[in-house]
Amino acid sequence: MSELEAELRKAVRGEVGFDVTSRALTTMDASNYRRVPLGVVAPHDADDVAAVLEVCRDHMVPVVARGGGTSIAGQATGTGIVLDFTRHMNGLVSLDPDTRTAVVRPGLVLDRLQEAAAPHGLRFGPDPSTHSRCTLGGMIGNNSCGSHSVAWGTTADSVRELDVISGRGERLRLGQDWAGAPQGLREVVDGELARLRTGFPELPRRISGYALDALLPENGADVARSFCGSEGTLGVVTEAVVRLVEAPRARALAVLGYVDEGAAAEAAAGLLPYGPLTVEGMAADLVPSAHVLPRGGAWLFVETGGESQDEARARAEAIVRAADVVGSTIVTDPGGQRALWRIREDASGTATRMPDGSEAWPGWEDCAVPPQRLGAYLRDFRALLTAHGLRGTPYGHFGDGCIHVRIDFDLLTEPGVAAFRRFSEELAEVVVAHGGSLSGEHGDGQARAELLPKMYGHDMVRLFERAKGVWDPDDLLNPGMLVRPAPLDADLRFSVLPREPVDVAFGYPADGGDFSAAVRRCVGVAKCRTTSAAGPAVMCPSFRATGEEEHSTRGRARLLHEMLAGELVTDGWRSTEVRDALDLCLACKGCRSDCPVEVDMATYKAEFLHHHYEGRRRPAAHHSMGRLPQWLRLVARTRTAALVNALAAVPPFAWAAKRLGGIAPERDIPRLAARTFSRWWERREKAPVGTGGDLVLLWPDTFTEHLSPNVGQAAVRVLEAAGLRVALPPTVRWRTPSGGGEEVTVAMDPMSLLRGRERVCCGLTYVSTGQLDRARAVLRRTLDLMEPVLGTAAPVVVLEPSCAAALRSDLPELLHDDPRARRLADRVLTFAEALERHAPDWTPPRVERPVVGQTHCHQHAVLGDAPDRRLREAAGLAGELSGGCCGLAGNFGFEKGHYEVSVACAEEQVLPAVRGAGEGAVVLADGYSCRTQLEQLAGVRGRHLAEVLAEGLGASG
């Protein structure tokens, strides 16, 4: 243990982490930059903060304060000690509705403050798109703004008082009239009054530099306000008194369509006199699906408020009438508004990919100009992009003249980095020429601080340095930011990654087959760090259960980045740090859809496990549950299901089996079906089937086959009732007759199931445990069996959502060299999709019952559930299913050591929903894991949608 670490452990009550994982998780924020810290401290209180500063001052080690780690300019990274306020100093101290103030700790997430203020009709004004994970301390450090800044201003406008510890350890209470000013600051200001009165541009989003003009006597000598936006370089905030504003009782959202972003920008300033709450802009390039928006190539999102819904709508209608638009819509429904706002908020992630899939990066994320000059600035900005051969799609706070943009810089090669510097220098001059600020929201950090002389001149920058010297004479706090800055092209996070593609098993088609590019997808916007799953969202259940960065999608991506870099994590694929971080990944695939940049941690986990255990002994669970299809097939062939069930019911045998299999002792071993689905299929009395209906292949997945054949039986009944011809995949290899055609379905002779010994399999259990060589072998055998079917028009209906997702996504990505894989993946349909596409005129039975339950996480992430919702509606099944993850997630919840996290995931949404269900409600759970979790934790029988519809058909169906 180093001397520094030992002294810190002795001095503070909070956690001190000098281990590889703690350091790796904080090497980056949401910027292009990377610095490896010496250690991380999670202080318990202000005394801990003071102690850390004292120890670090003795050792001359720099200190960086960090909240949610979503800063985009590099200011939340450092080479010394990182203070993590999110673990302990994250509370709401008090809230006074009468004075409309709240006292907060720096690690408090903004949404938690909003939730506490909402019952009083109040809210905190600024609301960045990262509101679900950014912290108040970080917002104060960056002087954050958000979409409602045209109404409620910046964070500085909402700060009353700040408790701060300076670089020399002084505890100061900052406020107006020089309250809390460190000794010497007033003298610096009094000697530079003329410069301070003339040296700052007038615009609503001037965030760059220090706000020394707030210390002018005519501005109330507001030390707290001047501290906002100092990016942790002057002192460390330990508590803040913030102002709250009255929230409108009702809101309306007008979405205005324009030909392009230039037209939208020109129009934005003209809407301000109508008193909108927001004037946000974005173009079509950032909208995954524009069908939910009015006609246009770019849009303004203009929100209005009022005492009533009618008043809010009337204000929105007035704005629509005044605007020269090509299309418009007004939404007053809160759910509809949230859906539209998600499109805008996700732009910070979706902007990281160009339409062709190439990468784009921050660095010039949020310049701001006077709103009246926004259109002219955008034209010059576009011209500069073209001149440099670059691309980017602007979006952001058009009403405040603040533009966000990700640009496709080449930050991987020396010429590309040199071009990045040239562009940055030239763009800074363009911004200044329009009277703008280099930063309009996210701070200067390392990305722009070097260019501040272009905006302020050298004399003002020297004045900034003098102010920094008063607050922090030892340059202890976040050095290299704002004053005496590090070069904007140094410390780039990409420079440490391997230049040649890493040898991997999956194809990573969206990343050019490059695993490093796949890992680079995570840009740190940290949507995975939300503490509650909003609506149908899934990502990231393990973070919500543990609250640990290590168990977030971003945390795991950071560790994989460091593994590839090889500087901090030095043992590559054998890394225990990466293994441990991935251990609590449920492989729910939620990040594949909920992450704005579509990080696919389930695939990365499978890839890692494949390499980590290559040539080594695997955990017992990989053999017991990873090879589940083999064991269950053996039981079926030997007809020993009854014996296995009997033994599993005897405690000593069950204990031994669980211990040998690496299964959590708290779990019950599921009962096997006495008769498999395939045997039922062979022996059932076939009803006459017409020849007019489409042929569909019903996939006998492992769970339906051996554990819940009743689901398969119900599905057959419903599909045939809908007029479809149902068959099972072949179990012997057939030669495709010349000419192909549907006649090849003679392979559906049910007796072939008795003669053949091979079975189709999606390979899910092998993939989820990282047994990718075995998964490939299983999938190739499956493709051999399915080859004759691939020459027909028959779709493949898969009842188990996780198996359908595996066939649709994992199959073509794992067998990227086999064209048959894509052909089969394209055939896969869910139960609801099959009915909607192949029996569009069929009317399902009217069940007329309320439903509760949970959309399967793989269905949400990969397959989509719109057809299911339409089918439920047609059947009179009323109600919405919850989001999140059931927590069992295949083998995850059964593995030893995962039980508590598994239960915590279930307790988040699905179990409360089921417990609160009214009498007569149907508990829907299409996934076998979901049904098992409900049965074992709540004693409730969940049902597949096919079962509910089959019951609705009646006994004669």
Image (tube, helix red, strand yellow):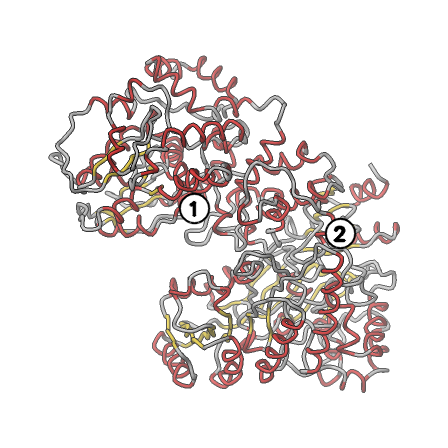
Total count of labels: 2
- Say which amino acid is labelled 2: Arg
User: Label 1 to label 2, Cα distance in Å?
Assistant: 35 Å
Q: Which label sits on residue 862?
A: 1
Residues 48 and 590: in front is 590
Image disc number at residue 934: none
Horizontal and vertical percent position of residue 865? 35, 49
Measuring from the top left, give residue 897's x and y in whole percent.
55, 29
Left or right relative to 887: residue 646: left
Q: Which residue is mark 2?
A: 35
Hey, what amino acid is under mark 1? Val
Q: Residue at x 51, y 26 (%)?
A: 774
Image quadrant in which you'd find residue 402: bottom right
Judge whether 860 appears above or below 316 on screen. above
Q: Position of residue 646 (x, y in %)?
A: 35, 14
Question: Nearer the observer, disc 1 or disc 2?
Answer: 1
Farthest residue toward the front? Answer: 738
Instruction: Specify whether 126 is left or right of 627.
Output: right
Binning the other alpha carbons within 10 Å of mark 1 as few (below 14), some (14 to 19) or many (20 upward) gives some
Please rate how many residues cluster around mark 2, counting C-alpha atoms within 10 Å: few if below 14, some from 14 to 19, many from 20: many
Q: Earlier in the sequence, mark 1 or mark 2?
A: 2
